[in-house]
Image (tube, helix red, strand yellow):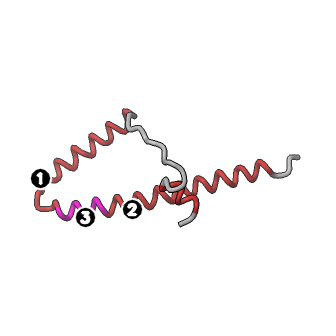
Amino acid sequence: MNIIEEMYNGDLFPVGTYSNSCEEYKKAMDSLVAAETELLNTYPQIRELFDKYQSAQIELISINNRQEFVNGFRIGGQIALEMLGKIE
């Protein structure tokens, strides 16, 4: 794991708290929960498969979020280096 990934994981610096107070986020979350509830109530026999799917999706999203953080940090570094370059 590199230093940027350690920062993302909060191992070097405390990770800031994310507030889920955004109305758009709440609306999307409510919609997701309603759809999951409807799906599992309609097809209760798929609970175990759904849980496996959900776990795999969470892992994939976590990996993607970490990589996006790393990419953004690297772009920021490139911008900083560009600013230190020769001024014409």
Give the class, few, some or many, for how many residues have Cα within 10 Å of label 2's Cα (few <14, many ≥20). few
Would you identify the image quadrant in which residue 51 lies?
bottom left
Circles 3, 2 touching at the beta carbon (< 8 Å) = no
Label 1, label 3: how many angstroms apart (C-alpha)?
18 Å
Residues shaded magenta = 48-55
Front tag of 1 and 3: 3
Front tag of 2 and 1: 2
- The kind of residue tagged 2 is Leu
Q: Which residue is mark 3?
A: 52
The answer to whether residue 54 is magenta is yes
Q: Secondary structure at mark 1?
A: helix
Give the class, few, some or many, for how many residues have Cα within 10 Å of label 1's Cα (few <14, many ≥20). few
Give the label on residue 60, or none.
2
**Residue at the location (46% across, 55% down)?**
65
Residue 28 vertical position relative to residue 85 in the rendered view, above or below: above
Q: Secondary structure at mark 2?
A: helix
Q: Which residue is mark 1?
A: 42
Give the side of residue 4 with respect to residue 57, left or right: right
**Residue at the location (22% across, 60% down)?**
50
Q: Earlier in the sequence, mark 1 or mark 3?
A: 1
Give the side of residue 47 with respect to residue 29, left or right: left
Which residue ends up furthest to the bottom in the rendered image?
1
Give the side of residue 32 with respect to residue 62, left or right: left
**Residue at the location (74% across, 53% down)?**
81
Residue 15 vertical position relative to residue 55 in the rendered view, above or below: above
Would you identify the image quadrant in which residue 20 lies?
top left
Label 2, label 1: how many angstroms apart (C-alpha)?
27 Å
Give the side of residue 43 with respect to residue 28, left or right: left
- The kind of residue tagged 3 is Lys
Q: Position of residue 27 (x, y in %)?
A: 32, 37
- The kind of residue tagged 1 is Thr
Identify the main secondary structure in magenta: helix
